[in-house]
Amino acid sequence: MGERVIIDFETTGLSAMQGDRATEVAAVVIDETGIVGRFQSLMNGGRRIPPFVQDLTGISNAMIRQAPRAEEVMRQLLDFIAGRPLVAHNAAFDHGFLGAELDRIGEACPTGLLCSMKVARRIYPEAPNHRLETLIRHARIEATGQYHRALADAEMTALLWLRMERKLQNDFDLPEVSLELMQRIQTAPCKAVDKCVASFKRRVWPA
DNA sequence: TGCCAGGCCCTCTTTAGGGCCTT
């Protein structure tokens, strides 16, 4: 499998559609060897961060006032992504902010984001829940930093993604795990993952 | 502190409701 980029946004709230803005973004590149590239920046979108979210993330309005403009950061992010496939934890959330911020600078939003939460619900159905923090503990991955900061969350999502790929490869004795297989898994019925992988394996590597 | 949204997923479902997950 080639390189993939894991992205994570911190924001002023939950809804880009209702005017919330990104406050920080991070992206990490992975290949079969692990994390091979990192991008992180605070970003100023001109919207105040509510106290609850400041407490959650540790990102204050003072920090944002000194940050580069959102438009500038999004152009840097696009350059960093460079057209590679994207992954995020609860991808619908990050995709919403990615699209909204790119729309503000007249750029098209990449499509087809893969979702580590959807895949995790199928690979680790026994986990207590499927929050990033819980999955990191469940998969016995060492935390790389403070949760709810973009770079740490992107790094930990990356390590979780790599771990899930490896688990699939081992559990199903696959020569490799492709993006197409991950895409199929995340849309398969939760109780039919084994059937989905077996069908894929028969088609791609016929006996 | 937890609501705000939206899509997914499960079930005591499908003519629906509620929990999960992201900030």
Image (tube, coloured by chain):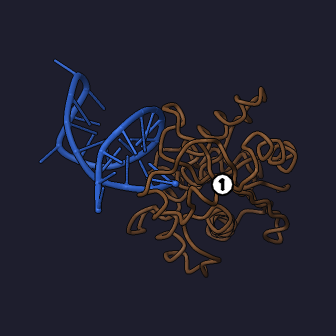
Chain colours: A brown, B blue
Q: Is residue A16 left or right of residue A158?
A: left
Figure quadrant of residue A168: bottom right
Q: Position of residue A75 (x, y in %)?
A: 82, 41
Q: Is residue A70 above or below residue A165?
A: above
Q: Residues within 10 Å of mark 1 (few under 14, many from 20)?
A: many
Where's the N terminus of chain A, which quadrant?
A: bottom right
Task: Give whichever of B19, A20 is nearer the camera.
Answer: A20
**Residue visible at 56% across and 60% down in the picture:** A60
Helix, strand or loop status at disc 1: strand
Q: Position of residue A191 (x, y in %)?
A: 43, 51
Q: The disc labelled 1 sits on which kind of residue?
A: Glu
Of all chains, the one bearing label 1 is A
Task: Give whichever of A45, A180 is nearer the camera.
Answer: A45
Task: Give whichever of A205, A13 is nearer the camera.
Answer: A13
Q: Position of residue A151 (x, y in %)?
A: 68, 64
Q: Is residue A26 above or below residue A16?
A: below
Total numbered labels placed on residues in the image: 1
**Residue visible at 65% across and 42% down in the picture:** A45
Q: Is residue A136 above or below residue A20?
A: below
Task: Give whichever of A85, A77 is nearer the camera.
Answer: A77
Q: Is residue A191 left or right of residue A187?
A: left
**Residue at image mark 1:** A24
Q: Position of residue A72 (x, y in %)?
A: 80, 43
**Residue visible at 67% across and 43% down in the picture:** A113
Q: Is residue A2 left or right of residue A71?
A: right
Where's the C terminus of chain A, which quadrant?
A: bottom right
